Image: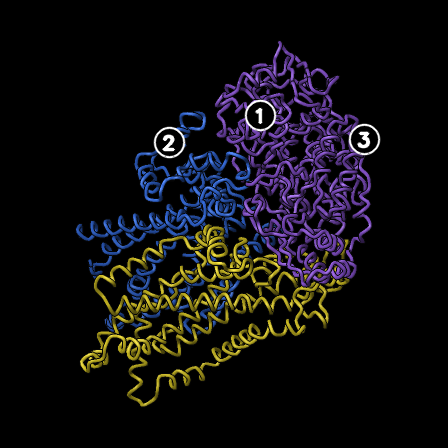
Chain colours: A purple, B blue, C yellow
Amino acid sequence: MNRTKASSVIALSAVAVLGLSACGGGTTGNNNGDTGATGGAATAGGDLLYLTKRPAEHLDPQRMYIGRDIFTTGRTVYRSLFQFPAGEKDATKAQTPIPDIATEVPTSSDGKTWTVTLKEGVKWQDGKDVVCEDFKYGVSRAFAYDVLDGGPFQYPTQYLDIPKDKDGSPAYKGPYSKKGQALFDKAVTCKGNEITYKFNKPWGDFPLAVAGLRVFDPYREDQDKGAKNNFVIFSNGPYKLDGTWTKGKGGKFVRNDQYDPKTDEGTRQANPDTITFEEGVDESIITDRIVAGAGNDANAITDRVVRPPSYSKVEPLKDQTTLVDSPYVFYLVPNMSRVKDVNVRKALATATDNEGWVGALGGDKAAVAATSIINPSLPGFQENPIFSKIPAAGDPAAAKKILTDAGVKMPYPIKLTYQGGDPTLDKAMGVIKEGWDKAGFKTSLDPLTETYYDIVNKPNNDSDVFQGGWGSDYPSAATVIPLLFDSRQLSASQVGNNYGQYKNKAVDQAIDKAALITDPIKAGEAYSAIDKTISEDYGYIPNYIQRFYFIRGKNVTGYEQTEATSMFADLGTVGVK
Amino acid sequence: MYAYVIRRLFSGLVMLIVMSFATFLMFFNGAVDPVRYTCGKACGVPGVLERNRAMLGYDDPVPVQYAKFVKGVFVGRDFPDDPALRKSAPETIARCDAPCLGYSPKENSTVTSMLAERAPISASLAVAAFIMWIAFGVGGGIVAALYKGRWPDKLIVGTALIFYAFPTFFIGLFLYKFVAIKWELTPQPVYTAFTEDPVAWAMGLFLPGLTLALFYIAGYIRLTRSYVIEAASEDYLRTAKAKGLDKRTILWKHTMRSALTPLITLAALDFAGLLGGAIITETVFNYQGLGKLAVDAATTWDLPVTVGIVLTLSTIVILANIIVDVLYAVIDPRVKLA
Amino acid sequence: MSIQPPAEDLSTDVVATAAEEVGATKIEGRTPWQLVRMRLRRDKTTMFILVVVLFGLIMGITAPILSRLGVLDPFSGNRELIDVTGGGLPLGRFGGVSWAHPLGVVPGTGQDVLSRLVLGVTYSLGIAVSATLLAIGLGTFVGVVAGYSRGWLDFWLSRLIDLTLTFPQTLMLIALSPIVVRLLTDRFGVPEGDIANGMYVVGVLGLFGWPIFARVIRSQVLSIREREFIEAARSLGANNRRIYAKELLPNLWAPILIYSTLLMPQFISAEAALSYLGVGIKPPTPTLGNVLRDSIQYAESDFIFFFFPALFIAILVLSLNLLGDGLRDALDPKADR
């Protein structure tokens, strides 16, 4: 597979975590407020305010790859074949796809051919029916990834049964150049209101991918203006965009009169009359505004965590805060092409002070130490035997002994590259440095801004360790281990998602085998076994699982954060008093 | 006089050409591949670098790129720049009308339209700050001069210096967090378009405007103060006093006029510089003006936007200099027209 | 906005009168230095400010030595001093103030705030002094050459000054940062990290900071070169180099001194602003800007930590500005303030 992709780079950012849902009981450990529907029963009406710092990069469904954007738009303006149920407290059910525009979630006997029947009466905002051809056109856009970059195009381009060119790219080049159109027309076919996808290998996770991403969403060909449509929303959901969306400022959703709730499964309650998105607001300001609750700020929700300096301020407002584990795991990857000695990597892992790191990030409201790159909430997860043995605070003395025994010359220089820009993360990196330096390393910190993506993608970069963050694309370890550690995505010019340049034939083969397992639990166990192999090589060092400590306005009702929406607030259930 | 104006315009034109070419050399000198600075993290996607290179014409030598840019400013141009790409991917064609300052593949938008969208915000902020710094700066300076050496003088000059000593972003954040949110003394500093709601526009501008003004006030107080003191000691005023003109007339008709004329030049130039956006104030208050656009473009590697802004801002400064020089020549006949 | 404040009130004639004054004092048989020193000694405020500035300088010079000796410890964390469940805020009152940590500790890590600030003075002053030397050096060179040569060289140098002034300085600092830093490390082999980033900030601050000063020097030279003592030197057969070195430069030290003192606080503020925007020397290296960027988050939860970094910068900027004013008064008693 030739998977050199933007997903990697987005995932690397500590501030800009991507990824979607994660399976299992992620909601545990809530010690602040309750987990149930909060704020009382929601009723229709009112104006909801969505405050955030991070602007949406793309609102084009095929280009979205950020969990927050996928689910906020999914509950409001974009419908797909399948979806996850809103407000579902049972973690397993919350991550089991239910129909949306499809009449039912189908099964596939061989996992390669999937036929889905569409409901009648689902309309676009201009009153035209959503038809099979719209779905077909939508996914075809993923093949024009050089124009429409940013999205999780690796799934359709790898799985759909279309021959590959010599360079490994699909022979179909997307709907604009139309090169290889006949090949695409064979892989995705429409018959009346039935759409059929043909894959080149079994893909039992297909319904999960449809519900957890937007890349299979329908798109109207007559509305397509290519990359110019990045912030254009042509809705088929209960809301539509009022006016235009301005990046960095946001936009306003109002009711879409063409939406018929009878065609929906009841997940989109669509309570507020309007939803206003305000982008670019600093985290501390978001918290301050919601705490003050003046005017419309009392109707506000956010996707940004309360920052440590504000903890004492929100403490009295227990009934307006939630604290849940997020699906995102953060970790460090040694650059295997530079740190070749496994003992050095072992010493790094042993000296890593995750406890101090978590403290610098703000303590147990901000993060919990992790012992595996696979989120424990994913199906089939098994404890990582290597990393769970290392004390959370690290053991610099033991690490020093490892280095001494291995005869490594000390101080051993290490350049740790990460995406900077956040003073809190800078401090946390200082803690890592302190632990490593005690063990006999000489650590230099290298915080980069946007250059991070450029540097990290160069196979010959001179960094020894990188920082990454990852959340599964849909609830399966199949969207973690293969994406991060398959060596076949490495090329002379790109490292793809495998920025530690980890190469292990046994792992590659095991990944291929695991991909064929259809039972989610068994597959999860197989990936945990691969995780163990990688850990024996110290191919990465797990750090922490991010936690979501959110605050909301005092008038917000029906507030839910479940696995169905990657632990972000569910816009399907929320309302305002 | 006309000859002077024409000469001044001509030298401004030469300056524009040199400045724009120098900018091109700075960013496209070949030391670092500029395409890498056009796509941010999307640069990792296969095909994107090549597409952007052909789209923006970065494969041309610098002088050719420069010539195309200049042509675009006057007659507009089409992107992608590469004719082959235009043919093979007609859906990506973007018309960039004159004055075309480039195209951002990252934002799928022409730089001109991005600037036009942001300009009113920066202009509003500049006006608000200008009003405040002239009111407090010049007003404070006059008061300080009139009470020279006594406590109002010391108080005004001292306060201004202390405010000036703290970094602008510190003052801005302090005002935002305490004055607007915690104590709720002012409305939220959120930008509303003037056409939408003039009252909300003015209210929202108060804190950002003040933050920005505080940066200038200290300098203006001191300047005004020393100009007024200097003017008050000039000989002709002594003559006027001797002639028996009353104090007030002397102060306002003579002293102030001669003291404040040079300030007009300076204020006009500072104001012009602000039209290009106040990077820090706009960042602190999340005002989506030119300054915020510039810092976002620079930190997320949107090179066409960065170059477009640098050129626009420098042009504003050059033009403002010409206007001020010409106006000055008109106002003050003593200025040598050389 | 530009990082530098509006043009300082150092109009060329003020400086010119300073020099004139200096020249005139020769009649009294006192050297200009003696006279200035006398005036300074009488100005109590300036003497006090001078002590503050000297104290800051000593602090800056000794901090690296002290931290190597372990007296200052700006990097080690003290986890036992912070409240891990309460957002990492320091335990105890007033941001964890104690004898061991007179200004408390950094939330999240428990590092000593005073040590970080003192070392921060080293970094910030280092940047400011280097950038000032570069700007003043360039400004003097261009100003003297332009003013003395006149003619076409003067014309083009003046245009160069105009040109440099048209660029939006802050924006250039941010925009050129990835390109130039990469250039420094890849092409010129400058070590990555603090050194390359520091060189970049110093270089760009200096390169955009010289023009106004060059203008001052130029007009200063223009007025001096017409004066009798230059005429005399020339008629005695002194060559150009001799005139530059022996006659011109000694008459320029007043504006050089004043401007250096006034440029430094601008560059200290600039470093802080750039840190806020994420350009320049990166954390955990404690420049004052880096410490402040972290501390402004704690406005309400840890006032001590919030306030002191800003206060350090403010004291440095304020005292250098006042010192510049005092020097101007001493060098130019006619200027009224």
Chain of the residue where label 2 is placed in the rendered structure:
B
Q: Count residues near mark 3 (Cα–Cα under 10 Å), then give few for <14, some for 14-19, many for 20+.
A: some
Mark 2 belongs to which amino acid? Answer: Asp
**Residue B23 left/right relative to A133:** left
Q: Quadrant of residue B172?
A: bottom right
**Percent x, y of residue B141:** 41, 64
Q: From the viewer's perspective, is the residue at label 2 or at label 1 nearer?
A: 1
Name the image quarter holding residue C162: bottom left
**Residue C243, can we see it?**
yes
Q: State the residue position of label 3.
A: A521
SS under mark 3 = helix
Image side of residue B324 versus residue A427, left or right: left
In front of the other: A152 or A405: A405
Rounded to the nearest angstrom, the CA distance separating label 2 from label 1 is 33 Å
Q: Callout 3, which amino acid?
A: Ile
Judge from the rendering whether residue C94 lies leftward or rightward of residue B204; answer left or right: right
Task: Return the x and y of residue B244 as percentages of the image width and height.
Answer: 26, 71
At label 1, which amino acid type do we have? Lys
* Chain containing the residue with disc 3: A
Where residue A63 sits in the image (x, y, percent)? 57, 31
The residue carrying mark 2 is: B78
Label 1 sits on a secondary structure element that is loop
Residue at 42% from the left image edge and 52% from the top image edge: B131
Badge number at residue A164? 1
Specify the label residue C97 is tagged with. Answer: none
Residues marked 2 and 1, same chain: no
Whether residue A560 is visible to the viewer of this picture, yes or no, is no
Q: In the picture shown, does residue C26 fall above or below B183?
A: below
